[in-house]
Amino acid sequence: MSTVQFGRITEIITGDLKMSSESLEIEFEIPFDDDPDPNVSEILVYNLSDTTLSKLKKGVQVTMNAGYKEDKGVILSGFISKVASEKGGADRATRVSVIDSQPIDNKKTLKKSFKKGIKGEQLLKELSKVLGLKIAVIKLPKNVVYKKGFSVNGPIVDAMKKIAKDCEASFYISRSNVYIRSIKEGDNTQFILNSDTGLIGSPEYFEEEKDGKVVKGYKVKSLLQYRMNTASIIELQSVFVKGKYRVRKGKHYRRGDAYYTEVEVIA
């Protein structure tokens, strides 16, 4: 499928309210990654009416679609954390901050000992219930057995991070859903990224150490592409780089005429 550069469109949906770039000027920066810490996205909308502005409140759920008239999809699903409106010249800019997450109480603590022989998957499911999290996917590379049991005495999120690491899994939140699975697992988008579908320039090789392991991959820039998100599996085709890669982090953004997606992918 070929990505069409023209007919760019951005939609913001919350409750019965729908805002579109066809009638409003909308800019944004939407970051995403494969860790459980919430990402904060920034949306800038110009010249909103007072009625529309009154519907944008902290805690309200927001979905953003972006792409092109014939091919658009979700790039953000989260909850408003802050709204600030200011006037500059003839335009009034409203900045909406959105947390790309289910509402998580990172400070919520628990003091509890779990039975001997409990497995990692059971622990993660039980702790997620305490936090009120809905797990979209849980697929552990290694379902660790805690022979002596497991004790939580502090922040629940920190305990879940430790258990996921013990089970060699990545624990992250994307588009308001929780995923706990191998860093190599992902969602096969069946999307081929090349110069015809939006690839800009050549992928840039990178290498870094993370958790005692060397991570190798490429930094990639393309025209805005909603299919590329945390854990998306894409096929990369460039002059020097060809193969299937998993997106580990990146951002979608629009500033002026810029309408791009930048990601880091690993094999």
Image: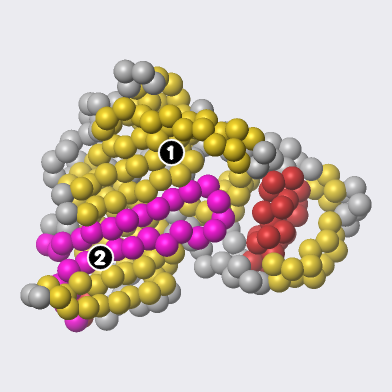
The residue lying toward the viewer, choosing from 91 and 148, is 91
Q: In the image, residue 213 lies at what x, y percent?
A: 64, 35
Circle 2: residue type: Leu
Q: In the image, residue 134 lies at what x, y percent?
A: 58, 58
How many numbered markers are drawn? 2
Q: Residues within 10 Å of mark 2 (few under 14, many from 20)?
A: some
Q: Closer to the observer: label 2 or label 1?
A: 1
Tag on residue 264?
1
Relative placement, left or right, of 28 versus 157 is left
Helix, strand or loop for disc 1:
strand
Q: Is residue 245 above or below residue 251?
A: above
Helix, strand or loop for disc 2:
strand
Circle 1: residue type: Glu
Which of the marked residues, 2 or 1, is nearer the chain's N terminus?
A: 2
- In which quadrant will I find the N terminus? top left
Task: Report the residue at 34% width, 22% height from top.
Answer: 237
Residue 38 lies within the magenta run: yes
Task: Report the residue at 41% width, 45% height from top.
Answer: 250
Q: Quadrant of residue 100?
A: bottom left
Please indicate, yes or no, whether residue 189 appears anywhere in the rendered image: no
Residue furthest out toward the left: 90
Task: Report the residue at 79% width, 43% height from top.
Answer: 144
Tag on residue 23?
none
Residue 211 lies within the magenta run: no
* Magenta-colored span: 23-50
Please indicate, yes or no, whether residue 39 appears anywhere in the rendered image: yes
Q: In the image, residue 40 lies at what x, y percent?
A: 42, 62
Q: How is the image coloured?
A: secondary structure
Residue corresponding to mark 2 = 44
Q: Quadrant of residue 139?
A: top right
Q: Residues within 10 Å of mark 1 (few under 14, many from 20)?
A: many
